[in-house]
Structure formats: C-alpha cells, structure tokens
Amino acid sequence: MSRIYLLAAAICSFLLAGCHQSVYVLELTPDDAGVHRKLTVWRATGPKSEHLQQIYGAAKSIENGKHVFEGRFSQTMPADISGYGRWVRYESPLGNVTGYSERFRGSDDLQQQLADRQVALDRLVDLTIAWFRSEMKGDPHQDRVEQFLDEELRRDLKNLAIYVWMQGVVADEPDAGAEEVAFRLLQYFEQRGYWGPTDLPRLLNAMVPAEGNTQEQWLLREVQRTLARKIGIPDDQPIPQGLAFLGDAKYVERSLEAFCRQTDEYRQAYERWRQEHPDKPESDVPEAMNVVVGELVVPIYMQGWQLGFPDHLEVRLNLAKEPYQTNGRWDAEAHQVIWEHRLPAGPLPAFSYAVWSEPDTAAQQARFGRTLLTDAKLARYVMWYCGLDDEEKQAWDAFIQASDAELQLRARIELFRFPQEDEDSAPLSDIPRSLLLAALDAD
C-alpha cells in the first residue's frame, strides 16, 4: 500500500503548494553601520503579511498587489522569510572585511529531520500492519504478511526515505540527480524481489493517469502480486484469499477511510478542526485518509520535493565591487550579487553568503607606497589583526605607523617579531609577514 499513500500525499502536496505561492525580492544595501533591507512581496496573504508587519511595521508602499517593507539592521537579520542571518564586520587600520550569510525556510538540524522521518515512517508501517490485520482476520497467510510488513518493508521504506533525503541534501539544484536516484531505487527494489525486469513495463503503465479507478486498480493488482510473492506464492499461482480485498479499489478506499477514522491522528485532527469550525456540518469534515496520510507521509517523503509552485526568492546585495567569496552571481553592470532560490529548497534550507574586503587605500599608500592587501589577503590580515590582544595590537600598530615605503620596507617586515617571539619561533607574526612579503613579490 505504500504506493497508494505516496500517490495521495503527492496530490495533496501539489494542491497545497500551488495555492500559496509567494514571490519575495530582497534587496540589501550595506554601509558602515549595518544594512538597509528592502523586501518586496506579492501573493503573500494572511499570516505572512501580518508577520512582516510585526518586523517592519506597515508596508512602505502597496502597488499592483506588491507590498514593500523596509528597515535597517546592524547584525542579526530578521526572520522575515523564516530563517536566520548575520551581518558581521571586522576592522583594522589597513582595511575592513564584511560578511553576510542567511538561510531561508527549513531547518538546519539534519539529525532531527532524519529522526522525524524515521519516527513517522514507523508509525505509518504500524498503521498499515493494523489495517491488514483487520482485513485478513486470521487468514493462514496473515502472520507471513505481517512479518514482511514489519521487517522487510519497514527497512526498505526507511532506505527509500534516506535516498530521497540525501539526494536533496547533496544536489546543487532541487531537481539535480533525481534521475540517478530513480535508477538506484529501481535497482534496489528489484534486487530485493519487489519486481523483475519483465514487470517494469507493466508497472510504468500502471503509473499512467487514467479515468476513474483504473489506475488505482492496476496499482492494487501490483501490490497484491508483490505481497503474494513476498510470502512465498509464485507468480503463476492464484492470489491467496486473504489478499483478495486488494482487488477492489473502491472497497480499499472505503476500508482505509473507515480504518483511518479510528486512529489517534484522526481523532486529534478532528477535535482541532471542530474547535476551529464549530458551526460547520459533519459533511464538511476532512476525509480521514487525507488527514492521516497528509500528516504521516508528507514529512517522510515529500520534504524537499519540489511539487506544484514553490515560493520564489530573489536576493540582491548592492556592493561597490565583486566580493571575493560568494555562492551568488555577480552582476557587474548592476553592481549586485544575485541569488535565486526556490522555497522550500530541500532538506537543506536555501542559503546565501558573500564576503568582501575594503582596503584603506590612504593608510596603505602612506605605509607601503601602494595598496598591498586586497580581497582575500586583506580579509586574512584583518581577521588576524582582530584576533590580537591589546598589547599585541599596540606593538603591531607601532610597527605599521613607523613604516615608510622609502625605508627598507622588506627588511623591516622580515625582522619584525612580537616581544614573546624569537628568530626561530614566530608563529604570530608569520601570518602578516607572509601576506605582506607575498604582496611585495607580486608587484
């Protein structure tokens, strides 16, 4: 029955995703004190707009359904699109380095994601076993069917969940690698006797959408035959009587609906629904199978799958020059780093980062006769400088301030040592010495 669950969950996820698409354009403009944040949103309604108003106040403008929010932030970015971000700046007398990083939506707790999937899948298999037990009612094949579901199917569905989860984690793009994963899974389940090469054309036909219950009927026949094979009934032998109920798609649908109404998951969901809709008739109550399937299967299999129309996010970072390190795209004409994200992005949240350095050209010109440190070299120098204690900074600042491009600069750099260092062991001063000498050699 795993295919029936997956089919229902996929349809449910598709409909939900298509109904709530929002588009976000986030423009970031830094200065010495922080960052100006301008967020333009459209097709965002209800709680999303209220959430943004709590962060920014009322929208600055509303035009053609687009809401514009603006604010200034110094270090921690607001969770306006759900996530976490930082804006950090390090300074030195020779220049500065600034870093921006932000994740959007999702969770970065991968261990918990995987644990949640395993727990939910265990519950799904337990419910499947209970449903089969209620239908087979003491049939002589019941124990073998339950053993297969409890042991082999449980293990294989967990592996399926991990395959899909891992593909979402390692893929550069949401759909990248999906074809390879599909072939891996085909081989995985073939090797374990769920089907053979001659079964594949028939299975593909069973997955083609059809009118009425035709597709479900075909899928159920494949489930019947697979279960029979797994309990030792050859393909040329009739389906055991205990599995005959799977031959009628309409009966299976009614049976599953009745079974799901008895579950704790549905009882709790019904109580919540009734509290939220006290005046609605019982005829409007959500179908039990949709409730149970949606709450169990979607977290297991659908998390990170791009179904329907996911939200779209574009982040634009305004900079004077290209950052030396980023996972975004540099637009030289617009002087922007640009990121394009689909939300949710997969098991790993969407993530943007950039690091850039700004040399103090006047200070470097005065000390070295030219700008020696830029980009990554300047950033490494600034981080080294910020890691010094007060006494060490005083010693280094005195050395730099006394530097003169005309006074044997290379020799002075080579000879400098902190008070605690000697000629043979100078780990602290080795870093700026190597950076400055390498820059001199490059001229």
Image (cartoon, rainbow, N blue to C red):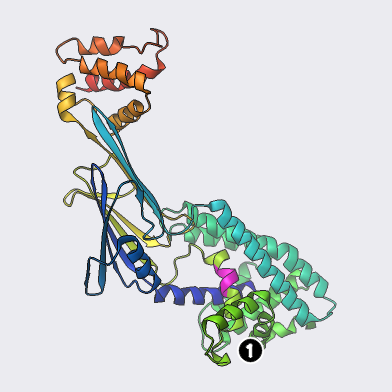
Viewed as shown, does residue 305 lie left or right of 311? right
Which residue shows up at 57% across the image and 55% down it?
A: 112
Q: Quadrant of the N terminus?
A: bottom right
Residue 106 percent coordinates (x, y): 46, 59
In this orientation, which residue lies closer to the viewer: 355 or 3? Answer: 355
Quarter holding residue 401: top left
- Picture quadrant where residue 283 is located: bottom right
Task: Report the residue at 61% width, 82% height from top.
Answer: 288
- Write down the residue under mark 1: 250
* Residue stretch in magenta: 294-298
Residue 309 location (% of width, % of height): 39, 71
Q: Which residue: 36% across, 55% down?
A: 78
Could you say which is closer to the camera, residue 342 or residue 276? 276
Q: Is residue 428 magenta?
A: no
Residue 123 in view here:
yes
Is residue 190 in view?
A: no
Q: Residues within 10 Å of mark 1 (few under 14, many from 20)?
A: few
Name the residue rendered at 61%, 67% in the picture: 197
Residue 154 in the figure: left or right of residue 201? right
Q: Is residue 401 above or below residue 209?
A: above
Task: Provide residue 214's location: percent of width, then percent of height.
Answer: 57, 86
**Above or below for 136 versus 31:** below
Secondary structure under badge 1?
helix
